[in-house]
Amino acid sequence: MASNDRVRVRGVTIHRPVIYGNTAWVLTPKEREALPSSDHTHRWTVAVRSAASSPDSDIVGGADDLSYFIKRVTFKLHDTYPNPNRNVDKPPFEVSETGWGEFEITIRINFVTESGEKAVTFYHHLKLHPWTASGSGEPEIPSLEAAAKAGPVHSWQYDEIVFNDPYQIFLNILTAHPPTPLPKHKRRPIPFHTANPASLEASKGGTPEFTQEMEREEAERLEKALKTIVEDTHKWRNKLIEKENESNRLKKELEAALQS
Ligand code: SLL
């Protein structure tokens, strides 16, 4: 390693877009018969992938091989699974299983040694059942027959892994592998996300794909939410001051009354 490889490049921030999540399919009666556990209803794949999809692929994301910066992904499954900690040391960074229930999966990403970076952790709720009406009443789990007809369930989250002040050697590796850009506009259904219930309709009808448009819309939603939080914080702070003043006034009145 050259001596300047160990040097951090101050002031540089570089990121890589990734998606994490799962796709799930209802098992056919034949597939169920072939399994040792007859109570399993679904087949699913949980994965970490590049955000961009390959053209004409029915896989969500995954256009780029991420092993130039990811060394290992550990998927921590529910304890009902044998060996719940699944280490994946080469691409594709994914685990496929069958099962009957939804649960939280912890996804730990370790970076290549040259990076000197600490692991990052994502949490993903494994989704098996199709999304139902947005926000109206209790979500219902449709029958397996209905779900099988509706096609695979996709639940994917876009995120950006950010590296601040990277080591020179790692920066060289990253810049040698620019990510495939996302398509500007919608070519396929968009990935549904609970933070954006309005996306339910646009998510229907095939393999979803992330776009630059979605990324921008999500940034706008976050900005709007932040504005609301700031406004609310101001409002409640003013209320608090008002109440504190009132409390002080009452305390004084009470003291005066006790002394007289
Ligand atoms: C639930 N809290 O009750 C969740 C737990 C666990 C799902 C879901 C394992 C199958 C196996 C499986 O599907 N676990 O035993 O191999 O819905």
Image (tube, rainbow, N blue to C red):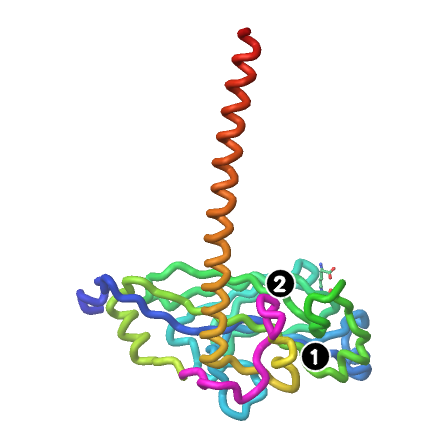
Q: Is mark 2 within 8 Å of ligand 1?
A: yes
Amino acid type at circle 1 is Trp
Q: Residue at x 73, y 66 (%)?
A: 136
Q: Which residue is mark 1?
A: 25
Calculate the distance from the C-alpha at mark 2 to the C-alpha at mark 1.
18 Å
In x, y percent, where is residue 3?
A: 17, 65
Q: Residue at x 36, y 70 (%)?
A: 15
Neighbourhood count class around disc 1 (C-alpha, 10 Å): few under 14, some 14–19, many 20 upward? many
Q: Nearer the viewer, mark 2 or mark 1?
A: 1
Which residues are the magenta region?
A: 181-198
Name the image quarter holding the C terminus.
Answer: top right
- Outermost residue, bottom side: 56
Image vertical order of residue 182 relative to residue 196, above or below: below
Q: Which residue is mark 2?
A: 77
In x, y percent, where is residue 141?
A: 77, 69
The answer to whether 168 appears left or right of 83 in the picture is left
